[in-house]
Image (cartoon, rainbow, N blue to C red):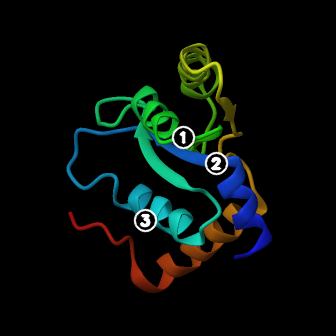
C-alpha cells in the first residue's frame, strides 16, 4: 500500500464533491464520473456526491454519511466554475452547521474550481474542437 493510502486509512479522510443540482434528468453524469475517478484514485476512504439544491443527497446528508462511516476529516469541494452567493454564503453556511453537528470531525471547505490554467487549456481545446465539429447541440 502506498504511503499516502496508509495515511488516508489512518486519518480516515473523506471527500464530498458538491454540484448545484437540477430538475433535468441526466444532469449529473459529469459529477458522477468525477466522483468515480476520485474514488478509483484511492486517496480517500469515502467519496460522496452532494447537491446544493433540488437533488439528493444534500450537502448535510453527504457529510453525515461520511461522519457515520468513521471519517476523521471531510473535505468538501464545490464543483463550481464561478463564484457567487452559493460559494460565499450558502455552501459555507451548510459546512459551518455540519461542523457544529460533528464537532469531533474536521470539516474542510476547499476552494471552488474557479480559475485554473488547466481549465483555460480545456476551454481552448473545446473552442478549437468546435471549429471541426460544430456546436454539438441540435436545434
Q: Residue 33 bears which disc, if any? A: 3
Q: Quadrant of the C terminus?
A: bottom left
- 118 horizontally vs 129: left or right: right
- 53 horizontally vs 93: left or right: left
- Residue 30, compared with residue 102, is above or below; it is below
- Residue 120, compared with residue 105, is above or below; it is below
- The local crowd at label 3, few if under 14, some if 14 to 19, many if 20 or more residues have their Cα within 10 Å, is few
Per the image, the residue denoted by label 1 is 70
Are the two marked residues, 3 and 1, in contact with CB atoms closer than 8 angstroms? Answer: no
Q: Residue 79: in sight, yes or no?
A: no
Are the two marked residues, 2 and 3, in contact with CB atoms closer than 8 angstroms? Answer: no
Sequence-wise, the earlier of marks 1 and 2 is 2
Residue at image x 64%, y 18%? 103
Position in image of residue 51 (x %, y %): 40, 37
Q: Quadrant of residue 1?
A: bottom right
The answer for how far apart the CA atoms under marks 1 and 2 are is 7 Å
The answer for how far apart the CA atoms under marks 3 and 1 are is 24 Å
Q: Quadrant of residue 71?
A: top right
Are the two marked residues, 1 and 2, in contact with CB atoms closer than 8 angstroms? Answer: yes
- Secondary structure of the residue carrying tag 2 is loop
- In depth, the one of 86 and 38 nearer the eye is 38
- 73 horizontally vs 16: left or right: right
- The local crowd at label 2, few if under 14, some if 14 to 19, many if 20 or more residues have their Cα within 10 Å, is many
Position in image of residue 112 (x %, y %): 65, 41
Q: Residue 101: in sight, yes or no?
A: yes
Residue at image x 70%, y 53%? 10
- In depth, the one of 79 and 36 nearer the eye is 36
- Secondary structure of the residue carrying tag 3 is helix
Q: Nearer the viewer, mark 2 or mark 3?
A: 2
Per the image, the residue denoted by label 2 is 12
- Residue 67, compared with residue 115, is above or below; it is above
Amino acid at each position: 500500500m502506498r504511503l499516502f493510502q496508509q495515511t488516508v486509512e489512518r486519518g480516515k479522510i473523506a471527500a464530498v464533491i458538491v454540484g448545484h443540482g437540477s430538475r433535468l434528468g441526466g444532469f449529473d453524469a459529469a459529477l458522477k464520473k468525477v466522483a468515480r475517478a476520485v474514488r478509483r484514485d484511492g486517496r480517500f476512504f469515502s467519496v460522496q456526491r452532494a447537491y446544493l439544491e433540488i437533488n439528493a443527497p444534500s450537502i448535510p446528508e453527504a457529510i453525515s454519511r461520511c461522519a457515520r462511516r468513521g471519517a476523521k476529516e471531510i473535505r468538501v469541494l464545490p464543483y463550481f466554475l464561478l463564484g457567487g452567493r452559493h460559494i460565499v454564503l450558502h455552501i459555507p453556511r451548510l459546512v459551518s452547521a455540519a461542523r457544529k453537528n460533528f464537532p469531533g470531525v474536521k470539516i474542510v471547505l476547499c476552494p471552488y474550481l474557479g480559475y485554473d490554467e488547466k481549465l483555460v487549456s480545456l476551454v481552448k481545446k473545446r473552442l478549437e474542437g468546435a471549429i471541426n465539429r460544430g456546436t454539438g447541440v441540435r436545434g
